Amino acid sequence: MSPEQTSLLQGTLDLLILKSLRAGEMHGLGISRRIQQITGGTFVVKPGSLFPALHRMEEEGWITAFWGESENNRRAKFYRLSKPGMKQLEAETKRWSRISLAIGQALETS
Amino acid sequence: MPLVAKARSFLRNLFFTRRVDADLEREVQSHLEILIEEKMRAGMPAAEARRAARIEMGGIEQVKEQVRQKRMGNWLPSVLSDCRYGFRQLRKNVGTTAVMIFTLALAIGASTAIFSVVYGVLLRPLPYADANRIMAVFEVTAQGQPSRLADPNFDEFRDQNRSFQAIAKYDENVTSVSGGVQPTRATVAQVSPEFLRVFGVQPMLGRDFNEDDAKKGAGRTVLVSYGYWRQNLGAATDFSQSRLTIDGAEYSVIGVSPDGFRFPADVDLWLAADVNGEGQSRTSHNYSAAGRLRDGITVEQANRDISAIARRIHDTSSERGDYLLKDGMVLPLQDSITGPARLPLLLLLGAVGFLLLVACANVANLLLAQMSVRGRELAIRSALGAGRGRLIRQFLTEAFLLCVVGGGLGVLGAFWGVAGLVALAPGNLPRLENVSINIPVLVFAVLLSTAVAAGLGAFTATRATAGDLRQGLADGGRGETGSRRSQRVGQTIAATQIAITLVLVVGAGLLGRSLLKVLEVSPGFRVDKIVAMDLSLPWVEDPKVKAGHAIFYADLIARLKQIPGVRKVGAASALPMAEGGLADGMFLVMTQNEVPKTLQDLAAVSQQEERAGIADFCAASDGYFQALEIPLLRGRIFNESDGANSAHVAVISESLARERWLNQDPIGHTIEFGNMDGDLRLLTIVGIVGDTHEYSLDTPPRPTVYVNLLQRPSPAITVTMLSDADTQSVTSAARGILRDLDPEIPARFQTFSQVYSASLRPRRFNLILIGFFGIAALLLATAGVFGVMACAVNRRTREIGVRLALGASTGQVLRMVLGEGLRTVCLGVAIGIAGALALTRTVESLLFGVTADDPLTFGGVTLFLAGVALLACYIPARRATKVDPMVALRYE
């Protein structure tokens, strides 16, 4: 585990999962790898955080789950973004941009 | 849409738990396999890939548990499983569980029962519309005490106040009423016309009083209570022809009050006051008063208003003296009714609260002891992924289970307890009929149980989950049962129990010694073998009719003396210790030829303070002193020579002689006391009799003037018969004689011992309850100390074994263990004494003959309690010396 890996900020995990699924349906490990990839290795999501989040988001109705075949023909549980999930992603994105902009400004002013 | 999805998830999680779990299991497994594949593709050997994947994955069971905790509705099944688990846990230790439940049931039940009395008497609003707007109105005496109102003062309050929309005066007495189905002794109130309006009450039938009913010479009118109307007027809707003879005068019935309205106290009939004209004196306090505040007026405003009027009267009145008002005040009616009961009831509530604390401490200690055995179980659960929150919830659930069962049993017990309390309660406790287990009381019981459960649960949970739980696995759950720290917590709890118990037992001790002191007081009269008969004749001013009363009394007494077994017969206007009691007033010392013609003449004399005196006024026959064995100290009591037409005579009590005629002989002096019964003839003092405690044993005897009942008949009397025959036969014989003389006069019989013991009931009531709480707390605290010490010995079994093996004597072991117990006991006793010194001060007014810091009580209770507590330490300490070193060491 490289020292640069940052622990996830509260609430950002949902956003990252939604963002990953935007690219298409994926199983748990796929999502985890995808997050690692799109954040340039900054975030590594462990199963202990990933699965509770996935199940919670499924219950919220943002993502739907189904059993499918993995690239190596293994049965795996796949997740897909739902319509409410799309909306949630937009809302979360806006919120996040606002926060990061504000934090950025705050840090720039000396 | 999301809502539907949520509901679906919730139901699925609830009803298809197994399928959902299997799905999760498969998902986690497939995740692991894909991970392994990934590693192998990257070139790892199979075994190493498997290992790396497992490390990256973390604990599979823990992952699954984390998902389960996040699930929708996860709380419901987990609460159910907590409950199931809790039940199993409690069932496993049936004995301990039973003790804990019984302890909680006792404490919650007792608290609920006492609260029901506090609620019914103190808190529950009076049963009138906007009852908090009804005020009691008082004059304030020169000594600063609230007192009843004189008629002219009431009139000025009524006419000049700007605070009340209705204000009324009232007075009640028990009298003979005929004209209904049968003659009865009824409680009759004289009220001014606005009376019902003050209480927001309308007659159920007929009309209310109006201003004309209260005018002098108006036709006499009466309102009857619902119950009286049903029982004595046959519930007739047309009562226009109904007439009742009350006190010898005829009244027409004008209305029926609604069911349940009996103010001021169990009233059957309300008469319009003042039809015979009003009292003119500003110093005869004939009436109580109550008023309903105008909208928007506060109690303080009304207080200032009445006070201003009262002070104006004080400043401008021609009358003077101690009996003239100095100020005025208002008080919410509820407070004025419940005021005297407040302190004793709050005392009981505090005492039962202490009992509750001791009980909770006991249960907490038992739970703590149990927990030390459960360390291993907690360690395993936490290793399997149970979070700290989940474990805390487990303990809360168990505490709730205990309190639900304990509280439930407690409330059941309280139903029975309340019946007992009401039976035991003194008659002067107001509003006792309101006391029951009702909704607010049940709400209290539920809240109390919840609070106890939350407290106990939080306590055990924080104790159990403090520190590193997994340590329990490393210890292997052997040897050390409970850490040193939990032992110290246990000892602190036990010390607290001892402290609280000491306060309670000291309180009970002080009340007990007060009762003994009260019983030591000689009442000044005999109590046993006396049958009392209450009866009343019409209240009249006409001297001729009054003379008739005197003849009637003389007749009655003479005939009662013929009853076999009856030795002495007397009569007086009121018995000592009886409800109601005697009226007090101002008498004047006169010279023999100075005979006043009117009450106004008296007022002039009363300006000379050195000639005035204050005493209770009692009309009594000579037989009264003989029957009650009130000793004659000097001079003579009444005899046949004191006829209706000879000079009126009086006998005074010793304390009056001492107070008013210090260093003089009162015999032969003349006094004027006609303001009490309207007869202005002078009284010549002929004798001095012993003091009697008229009101209660714990108030000093009051100076009393006795006049001759046969010269100055009072309308209501109590006949006293000293008899060797049994009460039953005397009662029926006396009833027959009275019926023979006048069938229209009803009578009430009781023995004087009943009257006398009723006067001690408030003291007995407090003592019995506090004593009961004290004993219960003592038992609980003893058990608590014993438990903690037994636990300590258990914990140190190995250590003691080693010490014994290395040559320690049993005496040394005993000293070591006892020393530990002694510290706990001393700490508890010290805190308890400090607490008791601080708290007993608040109940000083309930004590008699002992001070709040009575050294005998404090010393005795401390020694006793310390002795019992040390005994509770000694038994486990003895067991410690019996430890067999071989067994203790092999226990490894």
Image (spheres, rainbow, N blue to C red):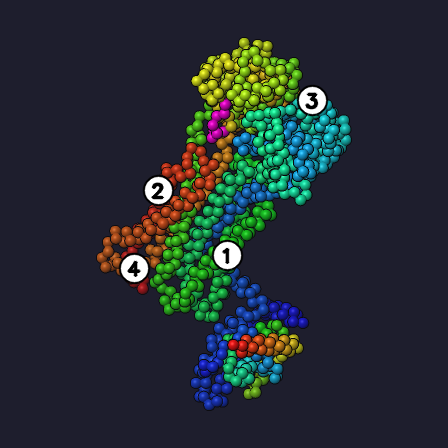
Question: Mark 1: which amino acid?
Answer: Ala
**Res B552 visible:** no
Q: In the image, which disc is placed on residue B454?
A: 1
- Which dot, 3 or 1, sits closer to the camera? 3
Q: Which residue is mark 2?
A: B863
Q: In the image, which disc is placed on residue B799?
A: 4
**Res B635 visible:** yes
Question: Mark 4: which amino acid?
Answer: Glu
Q: Name the image quarter holding residue B519.
A: top left
Task: Name, please, the residue furthest toward the left.
Answer: B807
User: Residue B866, how many percent across, how many down?
Assistant: 35, 45
The magenta stretch is: B696-705
Q: Nearer the viewer, residue B33 or B759?
A: B759
Q: In the image, which disc is placed on residue B195?
A: none
User: Residue B788, how many percent across, how many down?
Assistant: 37, 53
Which chain's residue wears label 3? B
- Which dot, 2 or 3, sits closer to the camera? 3
